[in-house]
């Protein structure tokens, strides 16, 4: 296929896609609405999709997310019978699939970034999508089957997140979106509103070029040989992560960490690297909250004989020998540094 043919295919796909708009939409401040987890969870299970009771995309149950989380028939049945969880909202845990979550609102440019990736990697096949922003919104999640659930990149681009088994979950119908005041809806591959819930086998397969692009190297041994250790004071790095309200990506990451039953050597390095990458590469904000969640959960669950040394080594490796702060992230730097220093010195105790 020639370059012009490839471009025409991409252009044709964009013509068939929902039109995009970058108009800034103020949030609709509406009250919370009850969910219908108890009515829909088993319907999804029968379709090969595993659901979790959640609120604002944050799981309300432990042990269902993260690297070691599980969603079983017995768990789903018990959650459905719980009077509180039965009226919770519903999110899907990604097993056998991923979703490409395109944000294209309030100045975010996910649609343009997706078009650029398609020119580079090939046009994505039509598949089921989900959004609470209407049939013609470019902001939506594209659901694709994958051959395995190995960890992948957390983002495909600045405004495109990847929902996968070990990270994030997907809010879907009949979940209520508080900011838009609408309910998430499924859309079939032809763009029309779906009349039935999709099945896992209804999702298109993610092309190989995209699988390769989203792959990440999880070999800590290989990483150690190619990345120097930071020799300076690590606390300014923690402040650089940002102490403001955490972004959605950092909220999801913190929730995943808090649901971990055990965080060992490899998981600690993986999570620290993800915390750093979200800030350095994708400009996410509020990362210090995820860092504190990781520190607390690591010291609660690790079996390492010298956890303080392990923590310090991983932090210095993740920061890297060439790191230079570009911003302090908080005007009250001294008090924040003292708080972190006290917390880390006490093995996870949150110091006031």
Image (cartoon, rainbow, N blue to C red):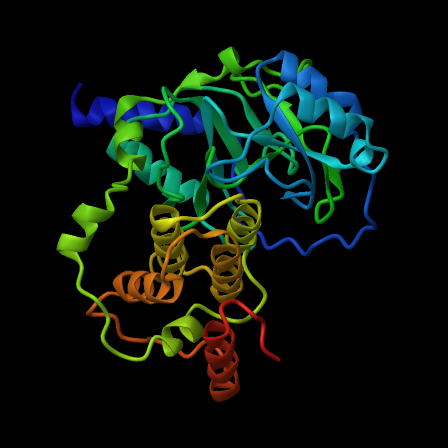
Q: Judge by depth and name the residue closer to the eye, 54 or 189.
A: 54
Q: Which image quadrant is residue 280 in?
A: bottom left
Q: Judge by depth and name the residue closer to the eye, 197 or 347.
A: 347
**Does residue 292 appear left or right of residue 36 in this picture?**
left
Residue at point 53% right, 46% down? 256
Name the residue at the right extreme.
Answer: 83
Q: Is residue 134 above or below residue 248?
A: above
Q: Is residue 9 above or below residue 260?
A: above
Q: Which image quadrant is residue 272 in?
A: bottom left
Return the x and y of residue 190 as percentages of the image width and height: 53, 16
Return the x and y of residue 198 as percentages of the image width and height: 60, 16
Residue at point 60% right, 24% down? 50
Name the residue at the left extreme.
Answer: 225
- Answer yes or no: is residue 194 visible: no
Q: Is residue 323 above or below residue 108?
A: below
Return the x and y of residue 68 as percentages of the image width and height: 49, 36
Residue at point 35% right, 37% down? 152
**What quarter of the picture does the C terminus occupy?**
bottom right
**What quarter of the picture does the N terminus occupy?**
top left
**Does residue 8 appear left or right of residue 171 in this picture?**
left
**Does residue 286 appear left or right of residue 132 in this picture?**
left
């Amino acid at each position: 296929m020639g370059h012009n043919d490839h471009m025409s295919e991409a252009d044709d796909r964009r013509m068939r896609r929902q039109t995009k708009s970058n108009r800034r939409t103020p949030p609709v401040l509406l009250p919370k609405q009850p969910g219908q987890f108890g009515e829909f969870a088993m319907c999804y299970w029968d379709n090969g999709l595993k659901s979790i009771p959640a609120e604002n995309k944050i799981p309300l149950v432990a042990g269902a997310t993260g690297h070691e989380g599980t969603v079983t028939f017995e768990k789903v049945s018990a959650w459905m019978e719980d009077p509180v969880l039965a009226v919770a909202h519903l999110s899907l845990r990604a097993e056998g699939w991923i979703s490409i979550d395109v944000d294209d609102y309030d100045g975010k440019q996910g649609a343009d970034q997706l078009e650029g990736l398609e020119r580079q990697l090939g046009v994505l096949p039509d598949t089921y999508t989900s959004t609470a922003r209407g049939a013609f919104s470019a902001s939506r999640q594209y659901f694709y089957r994958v051959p395995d659930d190995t960890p992948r990149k957390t983002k495909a681009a600045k405004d495109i997140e990847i929902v996968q088994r070990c990270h994030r979950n997907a809010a879907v119908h009949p979940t209520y979106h508080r900011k838009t005041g609408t309910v998430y809806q499924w859309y079939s591959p032809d763009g029309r509103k779906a009349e039935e819930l999709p099945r896992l086998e209804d999702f298109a397969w993610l092309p190989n070029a995209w699988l390769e692009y989203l792959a990440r190297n999880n070999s800590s041994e290989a990483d150690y040989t190619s990345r120097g250790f930071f020799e300076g004071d690590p606390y300014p790095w923690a402040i650089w992560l940002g102490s403001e309200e955490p972004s959605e990506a950092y909220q999801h990451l913190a929730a995943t960490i808090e649901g971990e039953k055990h965080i060992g050597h490899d998981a600690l390095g993986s999570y620290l690297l993800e915390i750093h990458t979200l800030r350095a590469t994708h400009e996410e904000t509020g990362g210090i909250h995820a860092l504190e969640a990781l520190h607390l959960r690591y010291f609660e669950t690790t079996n390492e004989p010298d956890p303080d040394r392990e923590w310090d080594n991983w932090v210095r490796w993740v920061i890297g020998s060439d790191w230079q702060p570009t911003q302090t992230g908080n005007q009250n730097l001294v008090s924040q540094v003292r708080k972190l220093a006290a917390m880390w010195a006490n093995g996870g105790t949150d110091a006031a």
